[in-house]
Image (cartoon, rainbow, N blue to C red):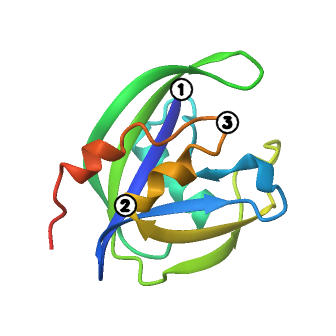
Amino acid sequence: MRASSYVTRSGPGGTELLVFHYPTKPREGHHVPGGGVDPGERPDHAAVRETVEETGIAGTLTHGGLLGADLGRYTNGNPFIGLYFHLLSDEPRDAWTHTMIGDPAAWDTGLPVACRFVPLASAGPLLRTSWLDQSRYLDHLAADPLPR
């Protein structure tokens, strides 16, 4: 099982979404944070853990609910169930670089990641550049106004 997070905040032009990419591996595209759910771990807790491990976000994260679930396949062909959560943040930084932490055996542990908030309206094309098109729940975020 995988848990991914659409992390949003209120920005000067409206809702913004946290995305990241690997500067040393541009072919990997842009992503929202997400990864495996550990045995015995709640998926909503995994979503927060993965967000912190992958982005080093410093702001507060608040659960905004479950956006959806689907079945997918890893690049090796193995199936997975994906759960997609909405997290709200008050992260003050617009952009930063973080070193990926987490599972020592994971291919991306130790890699630098470039994190940034982008306007929600601009996120779709970015999120369609990775192996897993993560743009599918953006409409749910646009229909759900953020608290101010």
Q: Earlier in the sequence, mark 1 or mark 2?
A: 1
Badge 1 amino acid: Met
Residue 89 pos. (x, y %)? 35, 68
Badge 2 amino acid: Leu
**Whole-number angstrom distance, CA of label 3 to CA of label 2:** 20 Å
Residue annotated with mark 3: 131
> Residue at 37% across / 59% down in the picture?
121
* Callouts 3 and 2 close, C-beta under 8 Å: no
> Residue at 29% across / 83% down in the picture?
12
Neighbour class for label 2 at 10 Å: few (<14), some, many (≥20)?
A: some
Q: Nearer the viewer, mark 1 or mark 2?
A: 2
**Whole-number angstrom distance, CA of label 1 to CA of label 2:** 26 Å
Q: Nearer the viewer, mark 1 or mark 3?
A: 3
Q: Earlier in the sequence, mark 1 or mark 3?
A: 1
Residue 140 pos. (x, y %)? 26, 43
Numbered disc 1: secondary structure: loop
Numbered disc 2: secondary structure: helix
On residue 30, the disc is: none
Q: Quadrant of residue 137?
A: top left
> Residue at 69% across / 16% down in the picture?
78
Badge 3 amino acid: Trp
Residue annotated with mark 2: 120
- Tell me: residue 119, above or below residue 93: above
Residue 59 pos. (x, y %)? 41, 75
> Residue at 34% across / 76% down in the picture?
90
Neighbour class for label 1 at 10 Å: few (<14), some, many (≥20)?
A: some
Nearest the viewer among 105 and 73 is 73
133 displayed left or right of 102: left
Residue annotated with mark 1: 1
